[in-house]
């Protein structure tokens, strides 16, 4: 409403010369792009006179290379707003020269450039005004067909999610989503796809495009088996700004419903939060000397147990992102939560606990497990609580598989469909062994999900990385880039695993803290 009110009195004045030549887009087209062309030595008129030939561009390929370097420096922080690209759509690929070079090659080495490229025809040949740049639906010879079939269309002034929630369930068999999900955070994508699942039949075909060549930055997409159609369809893109084209099919089983609101028993008063925070900060000074890992965990968490969940809610922010990639939840599913402690992760899926066959919360700190079991009894039904086992055991125990099979009463080789490490992997001394142990415990279609702290940079070797590593080390948390490398290239290196890593930063007391969500699934 506010946006419409603002524009109603201004739209004619601002865009009287056309959207593409007004405002920031017009500024970029008139000044920024010509300046960049001049800076890299690109004479577009000379190229046009050559008939947009491949030979010309191949002989002047340095223009593409130089342009890619310029875009790498200028686009993410300076040019993006002029192109209408919001911060949410600027992912890790936008900080690589290869990303821009790939797009520029597709644009300028396209043999159809002078006839089909959208931006060239729009800006240099007056676009829609003389119909040289119109899609088929706007070409005059198709107007009669449009009029004849106009009754087939419905127009909804709403978000995709709102539209999917208001129509009849299981209405659609095919969906085309274009690139709007690039602009959305993971939580919004998750909620939208929950609504899409309601509105489509199982197995419905879903096609979308993206400015990215991978969808790894949003953990939700680990719920889908995605076919990458980019090699086939990107060369046919008239805009050449969307390298990614993807196809998937709607799962029959329901997506995880992630409820981020803590259960009432997990909340705490301001006084309790302050006491817990004080104990956490002072722990390195007040803790006695213990050597065993389990004793260290008890020493650290025992005094914090009652206020643990409330204080950690704004610190461990990758947990809901991890849970959004849990995988479609089917009847009889099994789940092992390693280092689950107070069982906070269970409360994210409180509405779907009835579907599980068994859930094991594994931890070596009995104080946290006791809090978790008590919270479960206050929040869940007796039938749900009966499915949850609270186990004080080391994931690296030599007989962990046998002990867990005995507790669940399941076949020794059944394994777990989902295994989660929620800010626990970086606190396990023999963490590589823990990953191997978890891999052995996976079912035939299992997945391992890891949410944890990360380094600021890919290599983890900057001064900021050093500071965060030193700060968290005093609480027994190990932060290093090696963690990602071992997960992806050592423990789960084989092709039988699909692996994704989402890295992001969230503010804590106005300081950006890096986090990651890793998914490895068979």
Image: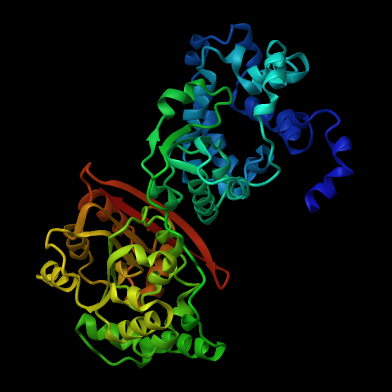
Give the number of marks.
0
The answer to whether residue 208 shows anywhere in this view is no
What residue is shown at x 67% (from left), y 22% (from top)? 149
Q: Is residue 498 above or below residue 114?
A: below
Residue 55 vs residue 501, the one in the foreground? 501
In the displayed structure image, the side of residue 134 where residue 263 appears, left or right: left
Position of residue 218 measured from the top left corner of the image (x, y, whole percent): 46, 50
Residue located farthest toward the front when viewing the structure as drawn? 168
What residue is shown at x 44% (from left), y 43% (from top)? 215
Q: Is residue 428 above or below residue 75?
A: below
What residue is shown at x 50% (from left), y 90% (from top)? 272
Q: Is residue 325 above or below residue 274?
A: above
Q: Quadrant of residue 393?
A: bottom left
Position of residue 158 measured from the top left corner of the image (x, y, whole percent): 68, 46
Residue 120 vs residue 354, the one in the foreground? 354
Residue 168 vs residue 305, the one in the foreground? 168
Q: Is residue 340 above or below residue 220?
A: below
In the displayed structure image, the side of residue 81 where residue 504 appears, left or right: left
Q: Quadrant of residue 503?
A: bottom left
Residue 315 vs residue 154, the one in the foreground? 154
In the displayed structure image, the side of residue 515 where residue 141 appears, left or right: right
Position of residue 355 measured from the top left corner of the image (x, y, whole percent): 34, 62
Q: Quadrant of residue 144?
A: top right
Position of residue 294 measured from the top left corner of the image (x, y, whole percent): 23, 82
Q: How is the image coloured?
A: rainbow
The answer to whether residue 386 shows anywhere in this view is yes
């Amino acid at each position: 409403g506010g946006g419409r009110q603002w524009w109603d009195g201004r739209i004619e004045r601002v865009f009287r010369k056309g959207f593409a030549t007004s405002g920031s887009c017009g500024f970029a087209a008139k000044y920024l792009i010509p300046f960049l062309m001049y800076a890299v030595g690109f004479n577009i008129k000379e190229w046009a006179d050559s008939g947009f030939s491949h030979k010309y561009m191949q002989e002047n390929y340095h223009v593409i290379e130089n342009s890619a370097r310029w875009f790498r420096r200028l686009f993410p922080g300076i040019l993006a707003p002029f192109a209408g690209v919001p911060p949410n759509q600027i992912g890790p690929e936008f900080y690589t020269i290869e990303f821009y070079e790939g797009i520029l090659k597709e644009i300028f080495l396209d043999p159809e450039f002078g006839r089909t490229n959208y931006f060239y025809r729009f800006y240099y040949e007056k676009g829609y005004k003389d119909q040289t740049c119109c899609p088929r639906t706007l070409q005059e010879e198709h107007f009669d067909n449009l009029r004849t079939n106009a009754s087939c269309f419905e127009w909804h002034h709403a978000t995709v999610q709102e539209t999917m929630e208001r129509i009849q369930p299981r209405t659609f068999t095919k969906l085309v989503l274009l690139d709007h999900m690039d602009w959305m955070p993971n939580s919004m994508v998750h909620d939208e796809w929950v609504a899409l699942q309601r509105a489509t039949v199982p197995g419905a075909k879903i096609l979308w495009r993206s400015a990215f060549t991978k969808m790894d930055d949003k953990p939700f997409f680990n719920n889908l088996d995605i076919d990458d159609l980019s090699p086939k369809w990107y060369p046919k893109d008239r805009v050449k700004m969307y390298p990614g084209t993807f196809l998937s099919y709607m799962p029959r089983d329901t997506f995880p419903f992630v409820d981020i609101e803590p259960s009432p028993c997990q909340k705490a008063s301001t006084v309790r939060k302050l006491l817990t925070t004080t104990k956490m900060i002072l722990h390195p000074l007040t803790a006695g000397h213990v050597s065993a890992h389990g004793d260290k965990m008890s020493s650290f968490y025992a005094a914090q147990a009652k206020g643990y969940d409330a204080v950690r809610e704004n610190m461990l922010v990758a947990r809901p992102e991890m849970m959004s990639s849990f995988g479609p939840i089917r009847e009889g599913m099994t789940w092992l939560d390693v280092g689950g402690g107070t069982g906070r992760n269970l409360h994210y899926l409180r509405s779907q606990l009835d579907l599980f066959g068994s859930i094991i919360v594994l931890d070596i700190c009995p104080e946290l497990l006791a809090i978790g079991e008590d919270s479960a009894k206050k929040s869940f039904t007796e039938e749900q609580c009966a499915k949850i086992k609270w186990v004080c055991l080391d994931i690296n125990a030599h007989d962990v598989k046998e002990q867990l099979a005995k507790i669940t009463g399941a076949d020794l080789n059944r394994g777990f469909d989902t295994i989660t490490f929620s800010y626990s992997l970086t606190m396990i001394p023999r963490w590589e062994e823990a990953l191997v142990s978890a891999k052995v415990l996976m079912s035939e279609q299992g997945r391992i999900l890891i949410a944890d702290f990360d380094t600021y940079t890919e290599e983890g070797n900057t001064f900021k990385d050093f500071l965060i590593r030193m700060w968290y080390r005093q609480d027994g948390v190990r932060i290093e880039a090696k963690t990602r490398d071992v997960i992806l290239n050592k423990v789960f290196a084989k092709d039988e695993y699909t692996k994704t890593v989402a890295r992001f930063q969230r503010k804590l007391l106005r300081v950006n803290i890096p986090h990651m969500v890793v998914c490895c699934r068979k």
